[in-house]
Image (spheres, grey):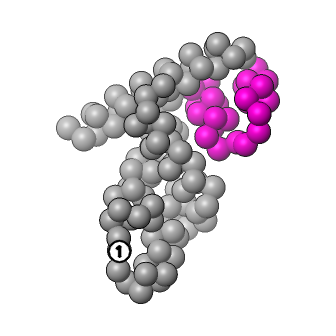
Amino acid sequence: MISYIDEVLELWAEERQGGGSESGSGMAGNVIASLMASQGVLNRSARGSRVLVDRAAEVEWIVNKHLSPEQRQVVTAQYCNGGASAAKWAACGCSRAQFYRRLGQAHRAIESQLLKRAA
């Protein structure tokens, strides 16, 4: 797995689970809440910063549009669903080795798309 992509996917899962459905991706509510909590001062290094929210929204788009259904399933199982690893593999209907092979492929695909979008 790619550690940077792992961190981005963890942030994506946090935003996905914590956000509402105001903007379609559920990412807008957290920025407003963080601005209210900080009295209008946006700390760019905090988890609620606009840069990180934009990255989470980008990842949401990449996961939904550019991953195969199998890759999307393992990414969702790994980052959005709690529980034991064996339950994740069973939910995806694959072995441990196949699960991590698909997850690695998804990491590489997400990294590739992020690099394309940055260029």
Q: Residue at x 54, y 56 (%)?
A: 15
Placement of 45 over or under 89, stated as above or below? below
Question: Is residue 21 visible to the viewer in this orientation of the structure?
Answer: no
Instruction: Pick out the residue farthest to the left.
Output: 119
Check disc 1 and give the amino acid type. Leu
| Residue 67 location (% of width, % of height) | 50, 29
Residue on which the image places disc 1: 42
User: For the C terminus, which image quadrant?
Assistant: top left
Q: Is residue 70 magenta?
A: yes
Give coordinates of residue 69: x percent, y percent.
60, 27
Q: Position of residue 21 (x, y in %)?
A: 59, 63
49 to the left or right of 29: left
Q: What's the residue at 49%, 20% (across, down)?
A: 105
Report the residue at 77% width, 33% height from top. Answer: 84
Q: Which residue is depicted at the point 42% across and 24% down?
A: 108
Q: Relative to residue 72, is residue 3 drawn left or right?
A: left
- Outermost residue on the bottom side: it is 39
Magenta residues span 69-93
Label 1 secondary element: loop
State whether residue 62 is above or below residue 12.
above
Give left or right: position of 69 versus 53.
Answer: right
Q: Position of residue 109 (x, y in %)?
A: 42, 26
| Residue toward you, 25 or 54 | 54
**Relative depth, front residue between 50 and 66:** 50
Q: Mark 1 Cα within 10 Å, few/some/many (few <14, many 20+)?
A: some
- Left or right, 97 with respect to 60, comes to right
Q: Is residue 109 visible?
A: yes
Q: How many marks?
A: 1
Q: Main secondary structure of the magenta part?
A: helix
Give the answer, above or below, for where 70 lies relative to 45.
above
Res 43 quadrant in image: bottom left
